[in-house]
Amino acid sequence: MTSQTLYEEAQGFIKNNEEPYNILLDAVKATCKKVEGLDRNRVKGTYSRGEKQKNKSELKETLKLPKKLLKMREDQEKNAGGKKPSRPVVWKDLPDVIGVTVVVYYPDQIKTILMRVIDELRPQGIHLDGPIEEKTEYGYHAYHAVVISRSGPHVGLKCEVQCKTMLHDSWATKMHDLTYKPMGYLEPRLELLMQAFGDTLERVERQSQAIRDMILEKWNAEAERRRLAHASLLPSLDSALQQSKPSTKAKELRALIEKNRDAIVRSVNADDGIIEKIRKMIDSLCETNLEEGWILAALIASFRAPDLVAYLDQHAEDWLEEVSERVRKGHATKKENVEIVPLAYVSAGNLDLAIDSYRKLLAAPERYNLDDDAVRLCQYNYANALIERHYYAPDENRDGPLEKLRQQISALLQGSDVPTSARTREAQIKAASAKDTAGFMQIALGVEPEEISTGIDLCNESRLVTRKYKFAIGEQYCDLHLRLGWRKLLELEARKPRAS
């Protein structure tokens, strides 16, 4: 009887195990798809071999299996150091008869996603078989994890899970037939060229990751600033509602907004369900009581920054016009709250509208019934808004030269200083706030490391005072400014030319 060739053995093995392999593949692929659905911010897509190969087969081509088996046996003998292996490599040991590829956006997401897939597979009796390995050949960069079934109809069979970035996936797809299915001899220099190109892609990926981190840090800082502005706005809104003895309708609407806060934040757009319902109710309230209505528009806009800014702007402008008309007719009282209008814009994520609003109020304070204290508060907050905008979005064409902007801000801050001898809690906190603003101005407008360091010192001194008096939101602002200061200082230091 003639013994079977390795190819014939491979054919028999695949014939007997094709169905179990496909069942295992379905389980692994479904798990990868689940992870993709749960983490779409990291995972771009998932696919299996059958979705990529022209013949649509999910299993590795049978003619490739004998070569793979022989290579594994050869490696086994080398690792055994001449000793006879306790168990020779068999067909079930092949790691990539079936495989799934998970594509992520950035390199630092690979291991996290692979480990999440492995964790999701474990309860199904499918476990990691050996360490996760980085593969680099012909410019190919990816991480491979081999999983093995410990139970069910596919017990003992393995599946390879690859994870790579979008750029490397595109490169591998583009060059697959040339590198893995060569029609003839592939010259070593071409191998080197492809390896060099792949390595270049890897450097680009790492650079894109660094750029992403910088952008995300900026987004996080802006989000933190909006959160703090929102926290500052709420007491102002509460005060405004209390001073005007809110109507039953306004109190019920406020309660409805607070009850549905999470739904408002998570809605896909500003026209969805509960948001549209609340907006119509606010519009109705504004027809009879604009003073209450615009405040509730500010509240809902602060939850949906920045896609309800236009909605807020409409009602805030109407409110300013109503106040102006009251003043003109001599019907204005001390209760009008217009100085919080710019703060509402900040909370809704639009510094440009906030700054325009401060300019409008300060250009004609008497028109909006602003007394001296209200004017000083507007000047101080206007200065802060100018500093913040320059830090997050510097534009010399808009703001003018740095020295001119610095002079403008310094003029606005005049009169906000508090004597260092002042000992009351309120006076100490006010002095600390002024010092924090001065420090943040140094950070935002500074161009030399020494200026940034001075600003950091001022913000830190302010933070110690706010912490002493347990002024939480003030301390949080100081922390934010310190974080921005250290980031800018590190950026400036990184730009310094290195000594040769």
Image (cartoon, helix red, strand yellow):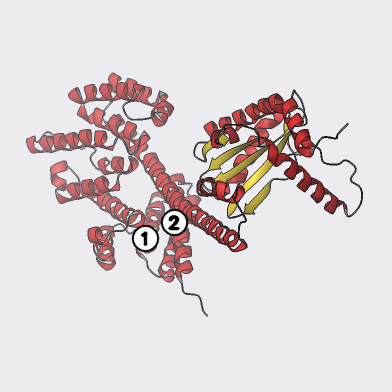
Q: Dot 1, how many residues are within 10 Å of its Cα: few (below 14), some (14-19), or many (20+)?
A: many
Left or right: 481 in relation to 314: right
Q: How many marks?
A: 2
The image shows residue 92 at horizontal and vertical percentages of: 77, 35
Up the image or down, 317 lies above or below 175; here it is above
Q: Quadrant of residue 11?
A: top right
Up the image or down, 348 lies above or below 265; here it is below
As measured in the structure, the alpha-carbon distance from the residue carrying label 2 to the one carrying label 1 is: 9 Å
Left or right: 49 in relation to 153: left
The image shows residue 202 at horizontal and vertical percentages of: 54, 55
The image shows residue 319 at horizontal and vertical percentages of: 19, 34
- Where is mark 1, residue-wise? 444
Q: Quadrant of residue 268?
A: top left
Left or right: 35 in relation to 353: right
Residue toward you, 294 or 80: 80
**Residue reaching furthest to the left:** 329
Asked if marks 2 and 1 touch (Cβ < 8 Å), the reply is: yes
Residue at image point 26% right, 48% down: 352
Q: What label sits on residue 173 in the rendered view? A: none
Q: Quadrant of residue 367?
A: top left
Left or right: 73 in relation to 228: right
- Where is mark 2, residue-wise? 484
**Residue reaching furthest to the front:** 1
Mark 1: amino acid: Ala
Mark 2: amino acid: Leu
Q: In the rendered image, is residue 61 in sight?
A: yes
Which element is circle 1 on? helix
Residue at image point 35% right, 36% down: 302
Which element is circle 2 on? helix
